[in-house]
Image (cartoon, rainbow, N blue to C red):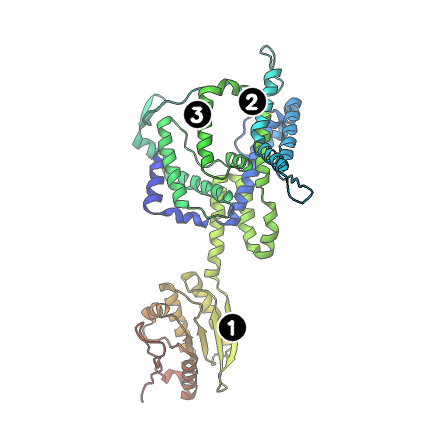
């Protein structure tokens, strides 16, 4: 409950749902595919009639391998048969009946509607049919033919205030002590949980947008209200969502429908749950989740953006190896690192240019904004090009058309670059900078920045520098504030 308060407060008051936008499609694909595999493997125990406890995907896989010799034939036959029937019924809704004129008749429309209803209700039909079979075959004095769910406690939990204290080994633990014992987990657990929840929402959104803030707010409220009926902390369930999706559920009304059925079932039908075979439930879940393994997206991703395969496979492997929550968290971190790499290593286009007057100069065009991770890289590469290609004497022009923003560290780096050029007595000019970027640079470099806003100004500036014969004797261009027009003449010469 403590985490619910933090979850609601943080995401509602600070609108931190924007952080969930960092869960990209590659991360979501890796998460959904890994979760599908984990759920499918976890159901092998019920499908084969095995009995063991496991704590993770790898542990479950190992236990299945170690206990495969103890499989129960009846469970396996029932489970595999149920999967085959479910997969066949999945395709029934796609059957098209057409009349002689190429269009279905009224009778054919009725038949197709019946086939559609049969297809979307396949999960419930399989569970009910298998339960009836196990009920008929059940003998109280002998072991059941298949592994059954067993007794389920009936009735609804009592409505009461959540406990703000507990007792551990005879020692009373207060609410504050519980919060203290949780430590950083009181913040970390909800964050990891909601990452998984929104990833599930995006996986089943079919390309539609997801309001992360609203999702998280509702999740917090649900957990807060659930604490009044002794509910465990919950987030979205991938397996149940997959079954709902496979059954044709498309709107939140499905949640209300499910809730009503659960209340009625707990009140009236729990004695009959005893006869539900575990193999049938395993078949329903496996048949739903196997179609969530998005292997088909690898080919278009390979063709369009191969680097996106890195967070996809990283998230997939890590979710299988270290757990879904940490796997998706690390996957998001890897994705963010890939986003930051262009900021740290921007592409610099360097080429020799010639003015209309015949003067050669070196044009350097950064393809990204200037922030602190990139400034040393840009400074070193520009210096190297100025020395090698510009022979330490040709004017160097930095085209700023792609530089949308800059920070203080970048401005300090540019100041160092200007000083490098001054020591070599090599001209350096900044062409077409944004006013906002220029203001940041001038805040550090004061009036040392030679800059031009138009090509004519650039040509005049370089020609004047060339004709002076000594760039050090030329006053650095002093220039317009943000209130002045770009068309204002910029070159001011020192009079001797």
Percent position of residue 212, x then y = 41, 45
Task: Name the residue that disc number 3 marks.
Answer: 263
Task: Name the residue that disc number 1 marks.
Answer: 350
The residue drawn where x is 55% and y is 51% is 310
Percent position of residue 283, x then y = 60, 30
Marks 1 and 3, how far apart at CA: 70 Å
Q: Which mark is residue 276?
A: 2
- Name the element at disc 3: helix
Mark with earlier residue (1, 2): 2
Percent position of residue 416, x then y = 39, 70
Which image quarter holds the C terminus? bottom left
Mark with earlier residue (3, 2): 3
User: On screen, 210 above or below 147?
Assistant: below
Tell me the mark number nearer the camera, choosing from 3 and 2.
3
User: On screen, 426 above or below 77?
Assistant: below
Mark with earlier residue (1, 3): 3
Percent position of residue 193, x then y = 43, 39
Of the pair 438 and 179, the residue shown nearer to us: 438
Q: Looking at the image, how many numbered discs can be counted on the residues?
A: 3
Pointer 1 with pointer 3, Cβ within 8 A = no
């Amino acid at each position: 409950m403590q985490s619910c308060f933090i979850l609601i407060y943080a995401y509602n008051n600070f609108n931190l749902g924007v952080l969930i936008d960092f869960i990209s499609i590659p991360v979501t694909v890796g998460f959904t595919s890994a979760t599908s595999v984990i759920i499918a493997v976890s159901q092998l125990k019920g499908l084969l009639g095995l009995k063991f406890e496991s704590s993770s995907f790898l542990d479950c896989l190992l236990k299945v391998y170690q206990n495969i010799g103890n499989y129960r034939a009846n469970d396996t036959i029932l489970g595999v048969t149920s999967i085959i029937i479910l997969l066949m019924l999945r395709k029934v809704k796609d059957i098209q009946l057409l009349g002689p004129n190429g269009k279905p008749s009224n009778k054919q429309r009725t038949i197709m509607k019946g086939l559609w209803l049969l297809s979307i209700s396949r999960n419930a039909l399989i569970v009910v049919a298998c339960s009836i079979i196990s009920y008929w075959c059940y003998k109280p004095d002998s072991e059941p033919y298949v592994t059954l769910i067993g007794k389920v406690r009936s009735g609804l939990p009592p409505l009461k205030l959540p406990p703000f204290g507990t007792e551990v080994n005879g020692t009373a633990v207060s609410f504050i002590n519980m919060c203290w014992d949780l430590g950083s987990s009181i913040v970390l657990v909800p964050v990891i949980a909601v990452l998984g929840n929104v990833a599930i929402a995006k996986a089943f959104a079919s390309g539609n947008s997801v309001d992360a803030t609203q999702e998280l707010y509702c999740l917090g409220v649900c957990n807060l209200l659930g604490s009044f009926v002794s509910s465990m902390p919950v987030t979205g369930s991938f397996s149940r969502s997959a079954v709902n999706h496979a059954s044709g559920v498309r709107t939140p009304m499905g949640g209300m429908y499910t809730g009503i059925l659960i209340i009625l079932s707990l009140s009236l039908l729990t004695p009959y749950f005893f006869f539900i075979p575990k193999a049938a439930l395993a078949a329903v879940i496996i048949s739903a989740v196997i179609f969530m393994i998005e292997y088909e997206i690898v080919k278009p991703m390979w063709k369009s953006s191969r680097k996106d395969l890195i967070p996809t496979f990283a998230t997939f492997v890590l979710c299988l190896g270290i757990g879904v929550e940490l796997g998706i968290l690390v996957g998001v971190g890897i994705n963010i690192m890939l986003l930051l790499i262009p900021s740290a290593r921007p592409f610099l286009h360097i080429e020799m240019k010639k003015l209309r007057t015949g003067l050669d100069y070196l044009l350097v065009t950064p393809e990204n904004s200037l922030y602190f991770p990139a400034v040393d890289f840009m400074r070193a590469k520009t210096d190297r090009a100025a020395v090698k290609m510009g022979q330490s004497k040709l004017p160097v022009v930095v085209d700023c058309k792609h530089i949308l923003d800059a920070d203080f560290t970048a401005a300090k780096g540019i100041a160092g670059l200007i000083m490098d050029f001054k020591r070599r007595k090599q001209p350096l000019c900044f062409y077409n900078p944004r006013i906002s970027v220029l203001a940041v640079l001038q805040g550090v470099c004061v009036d040392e920045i030679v800059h031009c806003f138009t090509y004519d100004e650039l040509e005049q500036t370089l020609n004047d520098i060339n004709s002076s014969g000594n760039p050090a004797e030329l006053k650095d261009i002093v220039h317009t504030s943000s209130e002045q027009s770009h068309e204002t003449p910029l070159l001011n010469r020192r009079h001797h």
